[in-house]
Every structure is written in structure tokens, then in C-alpha cells.
Image (cartoon, rainbow, N blue to C red):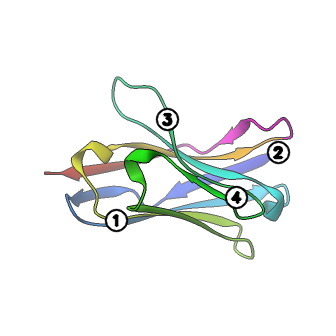
């Protein structure tokens, strides 16, 4: 089992920055592939970024060059640095961890990010 707790959301003006954090507990963090997802009102939950346990990354096209996913294995924390934020980035952001079957089986409670124009 993995427990995930996000923090760092809030209200920011367009062009600004936020850093989301996700603290993990339970399984050995360094062996986990981690991801950030987001869900805007009336829309499906979509992946934003993924960071494998060996360090490979994936970013959605909409955030490439603006968002950076990183991890601190000693602190058992994964981060999402969000720069040059746009109103369309407004959503609830979720942290997730992959389970043994390669699916994102573990989820945090979500944190709201609101970008004003």
C-alpha cells in the first residue's frame, strides 16, 4: 500500500508559478513510478507528467517546457514545478503511484490549482 498526500495548490495569476508536492508513505518510494494528473470541471482526468523510478520522464504536450516533475527519494516526495501558468491549467491536480501491474493504483486526495487571467 502507498499513501499519498498532495500540497501546494492555490490561486495564482496567469504567468505565475506554483510548486506542488506529494509526500508518499508505505512502499519503498525509490522503486515507484510517480505521476501527476489533473481534472478540470466537466472533463476527464488526464496525465500531466510521469517520472519513472529510473528517471525517465513524460510530459503532456500542453505542459512541455512549462512544467517539471522531479523527486527526492530521501524525502519520499515528488514535485511538480509549474511555470508560466495559463488559465487553462486550472484543475484539481492529483499525485499517483504505479502499482505492480503498471497501472496508477494509488492516488492522493487532490489539490486545487486556479489560474486567473
Q: How many marks?
A: 4
Element at label 1: loop
Residue at numbered disc 1: 83
Spot occupied by residue 87 in the image (x, y as percentages of width and height)? 22, 47
Residues at circles 2 and 4 in contact by the CB criterion of under 8 Å = no
Instruction: Give the image location of residue 100, x and y in percent.
Output: 86, 40
Quarter of the rendering occupied by the N terminus: top right
Disc number lying in front (3 or 4): 3
Question: Mark 2–mark 1 contact, CB under 8 Å?
Answer: no
Mark 4: give few (<14), some (14-19) or many (20+) Cα within 10 Å. Answer: many
**Element class at badge 4:** strand
Residue 113 screen position, x and y as percent? 35, 50
Mark 3, residue position: 46
Q: Is residue 17 left or right of residue 3?
A: left
Which residue is the site of mark 4?
A: 24
Query: Within the magenta stretch, is there residue 101?
Result: yes
**Mark 2 or 4, nearer chain start:** 2
Residue pointed to by mark 2:
1
Distance from label 4 to label 1 (Cα)?
Answer: 24 Å
The mark nearer the N terminus, 3 or 1, is 3
Label 1 crowd bin: few (<14), some (14–19), many (20+), radius 10 Å: some
Which region of the structure is painted magenta?
Answer: 100-112
Amino acid at each position: 500500500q502507498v499513501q499519498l498526500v498532495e500540497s501546494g495548490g492555490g490561486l495564482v495569476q496567469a504567468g505565475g508559478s506554483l510548486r506542488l508536492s506529494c509526500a508518499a508513505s508505505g512502499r519503498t518510494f525509490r522503486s515507484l513510478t510517480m505521476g501527476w494528473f489533473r481534472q478540470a470541471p466537466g472533463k476527464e482526468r488526464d496525465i500531466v507528467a510521469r517520472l519513472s523510478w529510473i528517471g525517465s520522464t513524460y510530459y503532456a504536450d500542453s505542459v512541455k517546457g512549462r512544467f517539471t516533475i522531479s523527486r527526492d527519494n530521501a524525502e519520499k516526495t515528488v514535485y511538480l514545478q509549474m511555470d508560466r501558468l495559463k488559465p487553462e491549467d486550472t484543475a484539481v491536480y492529483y499525485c499517483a503511484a504505479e502499482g505492480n501491474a503498471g497501472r496508477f493504483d494509488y492516488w492522493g486526495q487532490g489539490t486545487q490549482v486556479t489560474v486567473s487571467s
